[in-house]
Amino acid sequence: MCSAAPSIPALRAFSHYIRLIQPLPSLHRCRLTPRDKNTIDLYISHQRGPFYKAEFQTELDRKKFHIADVTDTRIFVSVMHTESLANLYVSEIYANFTQYDFVISLEQILSYFPDGNWKYSWLEDVTEDPFTDLYRVEGLRGIYIASRVDSKTPSNHIGPEHLTSLITFDHGSTWSPINPPTEDENGM
């Protein structure tokens, strides 16, 4: 059995979960090896229990993580793959809290990671914190609204014209564009 390491960097509490987002040579005295120097692993702990490695169904590099939302049954994580690509992943929470398998929910979600992506864009001026543009509709289970970045967006010149608003009614399994009204309250 593994025991706690003397120093564990980058721990953050989120709801009843703790996340660890650093490539470590050892954790709890167990040997962990990153896939390569461009990919870091995410470890999740439930209610200060042992850490378990999160598995992501992707071959892309995993450079940074942002825990976008946690409910009783699911975890949404945004993963920065390149300076202009972040994808949203979702995992079911299993009863024993020892397995976290993430599958793609939404490609090209708007996620900002300071010193990671969208460098020199207006996002640097409005926040110093990472964020994912994902909003849970309160009071309605499984309904989320998110912004997706157009794939033709220049790497550092993101603006509202490069975003599409999407909605899901099934916890992120399928996403549909939100169509604006054809006329305003005045009939125009």
Image: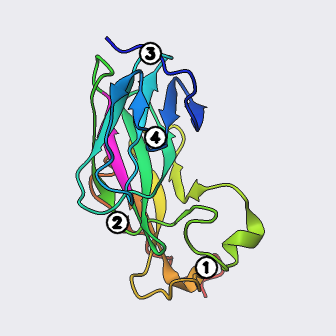
Q: Quadrant of the N terminus?
A: top left
Q: Nearer the viewer, mark 4 or mark 3?
A: 3
Q: Earlier in the sequence, mark 4 or mark 2?
A: 2
Q: Is 117 placed left or right of 170 in the picture?
A: right
Q: Quadrant of the C terminus?
A: bottom right
Quadrant in the picture for residue 101: top left
Q: Which mark is residue 49?
A: 3
Q: Which mark is residue 184?
A: 1
* Cα gap from disc 4 to disc 3, whole angstroms: 30 Å
**Foreground residue, 65 or 22?**
22
Q: Earlier in the sequence, mark 1 or mark 3?
A: 3
Kindly state the secondary structure of the residue where label 4 is placed.
Answer: loop
**Foreground residue, 46 or 90?**
46
Q: Residues within 10 Å of mark 1 (few under 14, many from 20)?
A: few
The span shown in magenta is 88-93
* Cα gap from disc 1 to disc 2, whole angstroms: 31 Å
Q: Residues within 10 Å of mark 2 (few under 14, many from 20)?
A: some
* Cα gap from disc 4 to disc 2, whole angstroms: 23 Å
Callout 4, which amino acid? Leu
Query: Residue 85 placed where, x, y %?
Result: 42, 71
* Cα gap from disc 1 to disc 3, whole angstroms: 52 Å
Q: Look at 59% across and 56% down and name the residue there.
A: 131
Query: Residue 124 placed where, x, y %?
Result: 71, 70
Q: Is residue 35 positioned above or below 69 on the image? A: below
Q: Is residue 58 positioned above or below 28 on the image? A: below
Q: Is 161 placed left or right of 109 in the picture?
A: right
According to the picture, the residue beneath numbered tag 2 turns out to be 107
Q: Which mark is residue 140?
A: 4
Quadrant in the picture for residue 54: top left
Query: Residue 177 placed where, x, y %?
Result: 38, 71
Q: Is residue 31 positioned above or below 119 on the image? A: above
Q: Earlier in the sequence, mark 1 or mark 2?
A: 2
